[in-house]
Amino acid sequence: MYAIVRCGGRQEKVAVDDVLTVDKLTGEVGSTVTFPALLVVDGDNVVSKAAELSKFVVSAEILGATKGPKINIMHYRNKTGYKRRMGHRQPYTQVKVTGIKAGK
């Protein structure tokens, strides 16, 4: 069984025990978060109607914070002596999917 969920502005395909890297979430390590399901596939049974999807809950446990790769940015203007060097590392949160359940 797997589901397509929306997290951090992107859609991810998840199954139980998958570890995802999503945009930074508020919450402590070990706490549980839920994601809205956009599609659920269980063998040959595919659920895509909004009324049926509202019954499904995809829960995940927060494993910890991490950072993305370093991105170097260089601004330069010719003949003026203007140079700026900056860097950026996007903060992410790692979560482990603990269950895809039909609730209610």
Image: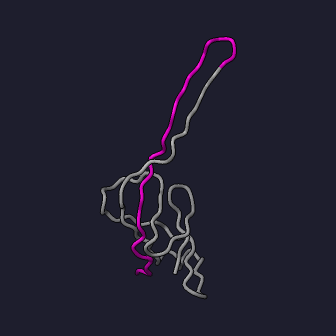
The image position of residue 19, as x and y in percent, is 45, 66
What is the quadrant of residue 9 in the picture? bottom right
The x, y position of residue 7, in whole percent, is 50, 60
Residue sitting at the far right? 78
Residue 30 x %, y %: 30, 63
Q: Measured along the vertical axis of the image, is residue 51 above or below residue 27?
A: below
Say whether residue 95 is left or right of residue 70. Answer: left
Q: Nearer the viewer, residue 73 or 101?
A: 73
User: Is residue 90 part of the magenta span, yes or no?
Assistant: yes
Magenta stretch secondary structure, dominant: strand
Residue at the extreme top: 80
Spot the residue most to the bottom. 44
Q: Determine the residue positioned at 69% across, 16% down.
A: 78
In this rendering, position of residue 38 left or right of residue 17 = right
Give the magenta range: 77-104
Q: Is residue 87 above or below residue 92?
A: above
Q: Quick one: quadrant of the C terminus?
A: bottom left
Q: Does the magenta segment cover residue 20? A: no
How many numbered marks does the figure carry? Answer: 0
x and y, in percent, of residue 29 in the image: 31, 58
The image's colouring method is one colour
